[in-house]
Image (spheres, rainbow, N blue to C red):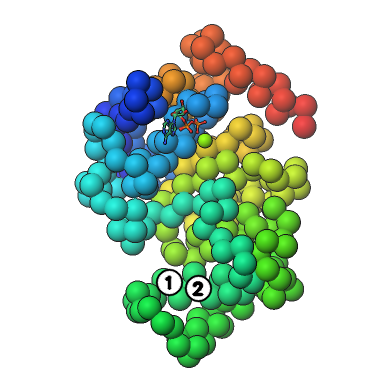
Amino acid sequence: MEALRVEDLSINFGGVKAVNNVSFSVEVGKRLAIIGPNGAGKTTLFNLINGQLSPTAGRILFFDQDVTDLPTHRRAHLGQARAFQLISLLQNLTVLENTLLTLHGTKPHRFKMFRQIRDFKEVFGQAVDELKKVGLWEKRDELVQNLSYGEQRRLEIYLGLCMQPKLLLLDEPSAGSTKEECTDIIGIIKNLESDITVLIVDHDMDMVFGLAERIIVLHYGEIIADGTPEEVQTDQRVREIYMGVEECIDYASDR
Ligand SMILES: Nc1ncnc2c1ncn2[C@@H]1O[C@H](COP(=O)(O)OP(=O)(O)O)[C@@H](O)[C@H]1O
Ligand SMILES: [Mg+2]
């Protein structure tokens, strides 16, 4: 079964074809990496998939449902989650408060304007479990802004998972992380339930080659290669057009 299908998707910013006639589909539970040089259109593609941008042309099917015109929050309710650049964490609140808010948001009464303390009591036990699982229970009263970058990433990914997503979009989870933190993140993603479909954008080739069963290479908004890591690594067009891949592969083998 297909988790996601993108058909002839395009978006222009002024004269720039940021995403140009992109088509692909992903089966449920697959780990797909999308790579390409800066400005290739990777983040824009994610913005289209989760509804932060509307395409100029094309459509997006999520579990066979056309979601092209749905706003982001509706896609979230259908099971899309996105963890990226830490914008989903509330920096001035504690780890525990962030966790309670997220868990509370997964309950049906989530749109109530003023929340009662007892509403949070319902999810407190679950929050304790989640934080212990992530190894952040000791940091529960710490403001998120005081956590290390890696801890913030870990919290963010786990909070994304609390939403019980069917599709997880990860935009550069390794950015700003140490090598150990990257290994941590790779471990988290590897241990995800096998029916969660993951799309991951990253420059870290350990991350990409360690996780992806399939890689799509974007270049100036277009797909120039789509295949297994081995196929992409040896693809002549990738080597010619996207020289960075070779550098990155060398870089990966150095680590
Ligand atoms: N909101 C925007 N307005 C105008 N141009 C944009 C916008 N977002 C992205 N772009 C342009 O679209 C192209 C793709 O950007 P982006 O998707 O961020 O690339 P990547 O994530 O692969 O580095 C770039 O040329 C970028 O400058
Ligand atoms: Mg980007």
Instruction: Inspect this view and state whether residue 124 appears.
Output: yes
Residue at the spot 24% in from the left edge and 31% down from the top edge: 57
**Residue at the far bottom in the pictured view:** 118
* Circles 2, 1 touching at the beta carbon (< 8 Å): yes
What secondary structure is found at the residue carrying circle 2? Answer: helix
What secondary structure is found at the residue carrying circle 1? Answer: helix
Q: Is residue 191 left or right of residue 179?
A: left
Give above or below for 101 relative to 227: below
Residue 152 falls in image quadrant? bottom right
**Could you say which is closer to the camera, residue 115 or residue 28?**
115
Label 2: few (<14), some (14–19) or many (≥20) C-alpha neighbours in 10 Å: some
Q: Which residue is mark 1?
A: 105
Q: Is residue 59 left or right of residue 145?
A: left
Res 71 label: none
Residue 141 falls in image quadrant? bottom right
Residue 136: image location, x then y, percent: 69, 68
Q: CA distance from mark 2 to mark 1?
A: 6 Å
**Could you say which is closer to the camera, residue 234 or residue 49?**
49
Give above or below for 76 relative to 102: above
Res 101 label: 2
Instruction: Inspect this view and state whether residue 211 appears.
Output: no
